[in-house]
Image (cartoon, grey):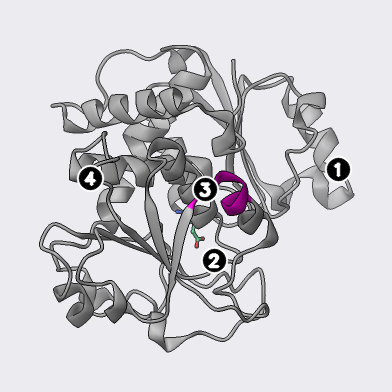
Amino acid sequence: MLSLISIDDLTKEDLQYIIDKSITIYNGDNLYPGLSNMASHIFAILFFEPSTRTKMSFESVIYRHNGKVLNYDHNTSSSLKGESFQDTIKTIDKYCDMFIIRHSDSFIFDNIQSLTNKPVINAGNGAYEHPTQAIIDATTIVNHFNVWNVNTNAPQILLVGDLSKSRTINSLIKCLHKLFPEIIFYLFFSSNKTDYMTWSNELHSYIIEKNITILPIHSYQEVIHHVDVVYITRPQTERHNIEYHDGLTITPQIIDQMKETAIVMHPLPRNKELPTSCDSNHRSQYFKQVEFSLPVRRVIIEYLMGYI
Ligand code: NCD
């Protein structure tokens, strides 16, 4: 049994397997085909940060397959009596077969193996990683463009938003680079170190170490006609005090300049960077990402639990 704390925990082959299986389920007649071993297991869901999609999609998938969910409620738990995260995990370890955890601390999983030998899924750790969201996003891209061998046909991705604190961008860069080493990312970049459009030191080191091609841009007009994906995120205002840059807001007029086959993605929730006036454009795929969260999170659970 494995844990999924970072995209680094999976090989390229693991990712391809999970994505292929998720697309097969998504495109099949029934999103919930067959029996799953989830029915014989208990899944502990511990969210120390707010969530709608991630938490409810995990719950939905587990309920659909007759698994049992233990929902930890931070506000009524013994952590209000001073209990540590470590003691909470060591306790719930006795009650469950798998953990699904979201926490604001980027380092919360550093010693998790000393607390439990059950598989742990990272559902978001601070500004660091959100591996299941990245696999959902990669699956949406692979399904839309129907390409694996992108060395000759790599989708070009424009990343827009809070580069310094967005865990979805961190994990997506890692995931897509692992799948498609030749991929090129464009991003709205500012060299001002206090700006949220500059990357964190960790992401910067990773980009250098892995030799990832990242090209900075300063306005949509520089690349909007040729990119295949615009991936937008909201400013992470809960993590730092930042002033919004109006130039990041995408509009129906900007989307209309994209290639017919290109897509706009967002992990949601959105703020003003993505107005609802963009929703009716056929290129807007963010609710498709929401749909993919079900087969992808199902396959991830089954893979880590060793059912498949
Ligand atoms: C993201 C998250 O929590 O990191 N949302 C999600 O899980 N779909 C994005 C965000 O909060 O900005």
Image quadrant for the C terminus?
Answer: top left
Circle nearer the N terminus (2, 3): 2
In the drawing, what numbered circle is on residue 171? 3
Identify the mark nearer the N-term, 1 or 2: 1
**Marks 4 and 2, how far apart at CA:** 26 Å
- Which is nearer the N-term, disc 3 or disc 4? 4
Q: Nearer the viewer, residue 224 or 107?
A: 224
Q: Is mark 1 within 8 Å of ligand 1?
A: no
Eye-nearest disc, 1 or 2: 2
Left or right, 4 with reference to 298: right
Give the Cα distance between marks 2 and 3.
Answer: 11 Å
Write the residue at 69% across / 60% down: 201
Say which element carries label 3: helix
For label 4, the residue is 153
- Which numbered disc, 3 or 4, marks the residue closer to the eye? 4
Q: Amino acid at mark 3?
A: Ser
| Distance in Å between CA atoms under marks 1 and 2 | 31 Å
Q: What range is drawn magenta here?
A: 206-212
User: Mark 4–mark 1 contact, CB under 8 Å?
Assistant: no
Q: CA distance from mark 4 to mark 1?
A: 49 Å
> Which of the pair 49/10 is nearer the observer?
10
* Disc 1 secondary structure class: loop
- According to the image, label 2 marks what residue? 163
When asked about the image quadrant of residue 3, the answer is: top right
Q: Could you say whether the residue bearing mark 2 is in a helix, strand or loop?
A: loop
- Ligand 1 contact, mark 2 (Cβ < 8 Å): no
Classify residue 252 as left or right of residue 5: left
Q: Main secondary structure of the magenta part?
A: helix
Q: Is residue 72 above or below residue 220?
A: above
Amino acid type at mark 2: Leu
Q: Say which residue label 1 marks.
A: 84
